[in-house]
Amino acid sequence: MVLPASMRLRGSRCFERLQKWGYRFYGTSMVLRVIEADPQLLKAPHRHHNSTACRCAVVISSKVSKRAVIRNRLRRRLHNHLRSRLEVAPEHCNHWVLISLKPVASAIEASPLLEECDRLLHQAGLLS
């Protein structure tokens, strides 16, 4: 499943801010970056959209896998997981989250990958 529009993070300025200033949490197969939301960086149609969930993005480089099918499968799994975990947590609606997968992520099964995602979200304070 794809993230709903209210949970998607868009725009190069948002990604640049997350890359430069986001708090980093490192795992064996991914890096989680979290920052306080700044709605002024969003494009005008999305700026005033009332959202009860934080905005998220998943970045998967071609270093993870050369095959787009595998990268898209990983992205869909993480989107579905983030949707189920963060959509029902309105207390964290003022955060932006960026998950970057490391090349070893393609060799890991789905269950340990999602457990690591949960662990990093918990470290970041987004899950209780």
Image (cartoon, rainbow, N blue to C red):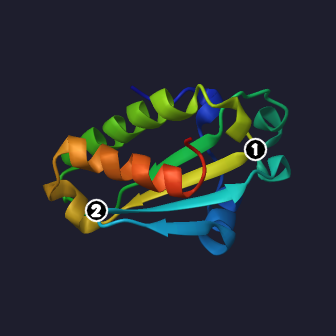
Which quadrant would residue 31 be assigned to in this image? Answer: bottom left
Left or right, residue 71 beside residue 40: left
Residue density around tag 1, few if under 14, some if 14–19, many if 20 or more, within 10 Å: some
SS assignment at label 1: loop
Q: Quadrant of the C terminus?
A: top right
Residue ID at (24%, 58%): 105
- Answer above or below: position of 72 versus 84: below
Residue ID at (42%, 46%): 118
- Answer above or below: position of 69 versus 37: above
Left or right, residue 53 beside residue 102: right
The amino acid marked with disc number 2 is: Ser
In the picture of the structure, the residue carrying the numbered disc 1 is: 94
Q: In which quarter of the image is the N terminus?
A: top left
Rendering coords of residue 39 (x, y %): 82, 46
Rendering coords of residue 50 (x, y %): 79, 26
In the picture of the structure, the residue carrying the numbered disc 2 is: 62
SS assignment at label 2: loop
Rendering coords of residue 12 (x, y %): 64, 58
The amino acid marked with disc number 1 is: Asn
